[in-house]
Amino acid sequence: MTLKLEKADFDAVADAIGNAEERTSVEFFAVLTKRSDDYQFVAGFFMALGLFVGGLLYVVIARLYWLDVSLLTFSGIELALFVVANMTFRLKPGLAIRLVPKAIRFRRAHANAVQQFLAHGISDTSARNGVLIFVSMDEHYAEILADRGVIAKTEQSFWDEAVAKLVAHAKSGEITIGYTQTIEILALQLAPIFPASEKEQAGLDDRLVVLSTN
């Protein structure tokens, strides 16, 4: 998926955050990235593994049919295929992720979300009431990270429902709608628990941050 956001998209998310924070003391911050890793090393590993298995199968078939290929030729073909594959991954980074298992993609995306939570000072609010809304497009991954002041008074099912809506819109390419509607839902349900009157001071910037990727 490509990220094609206009100024209106950034403004819409910023407005949604601003409106939400008028109703609740919870502080929202939004981060979007095309992907959370280049996956060159991981894809290269699985490609090498595939070539190794393919090579073993070829050796078995060659013995069955009395095919004669020198070790030097065989090794040269394996090396050439590996080099071509890695060059392709570098020229077209989006291809590498297709060789990476979902579990690894999700772990990398989660690690990126945690990094953004810390890097943007979401854990530094005085009331520990920061919430990060994070989407990594190529991994089809979304996560909402809330600081301990918010987690302590909410159930996990509440966050799961919000993430499900965010993922559904992201898969449809409706990034801006996904963010704005998710923020609206979070504010609506968090306001009774964390009323705006409890806001202690100005907190996080009301904006959507888009991370650059290679």
Image: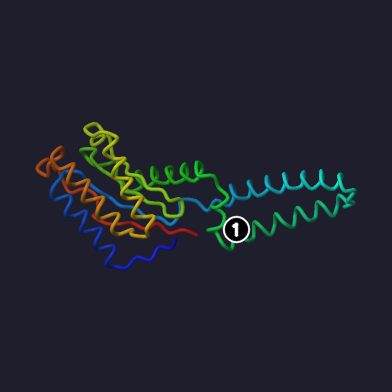
| Residue 126 on image: x %, y % | 21, 39
Say how the picture is coloured.
rainbow
- Depth check, front residue: 98 or 75: 98
The answer to whether residue 124 is left or right of residue 112 is left
| Residue 119 on image: x %, y % | 36, 47
- Depth check, front residue: 18 or 179: 179
Q: Which residue is mark 1?
A: 89
Q: Residues within 10 Å of mark 1 (few under 14, many from 20)?
A: many
- The residue lying at 38 percent from left, 66 percent from top is 4
Q: Quadrant of residue 155?
A: top left
The answer to whether residue 83 is left or right of residue 115 is right
- Residue 81 sits above or below residue 158 on the image: below
| Residue 165 on image: x %, y % | 31, 49
- The residue lying at 58 percent from left, 47 percent from top is 42
- Residue 12 sits above or below residue 60 on the image: below
Q: Secondary structure at mark 1?
A: helix
The answer to whether residue 22 is left or right of residue 38 is left
Q: Residue furthest front?
A: 65
Q: Residue furthest top?
A: 152
Q: Quadrant of the N terminus?
A: bottom left
Q: Quadrant of residue 87?
A: bottom right
Q: Residue furthest left?
A: 197
Give the number of marks: 1
* Kind of residue at badge 1: Phe
The answer to whether residue 41 is left or right of residue 167 is right
- Residue 214 sits above or below residue 105 on the image: below
| Residue 198 on image: x %, y % | 12, 40
- The residue lying at 24 percent from left, 58 percent from top is 14
- The residue lying at 42 percent from left, 43 percent from top is 110
Q: Quadrant of residue 190?
A: top left
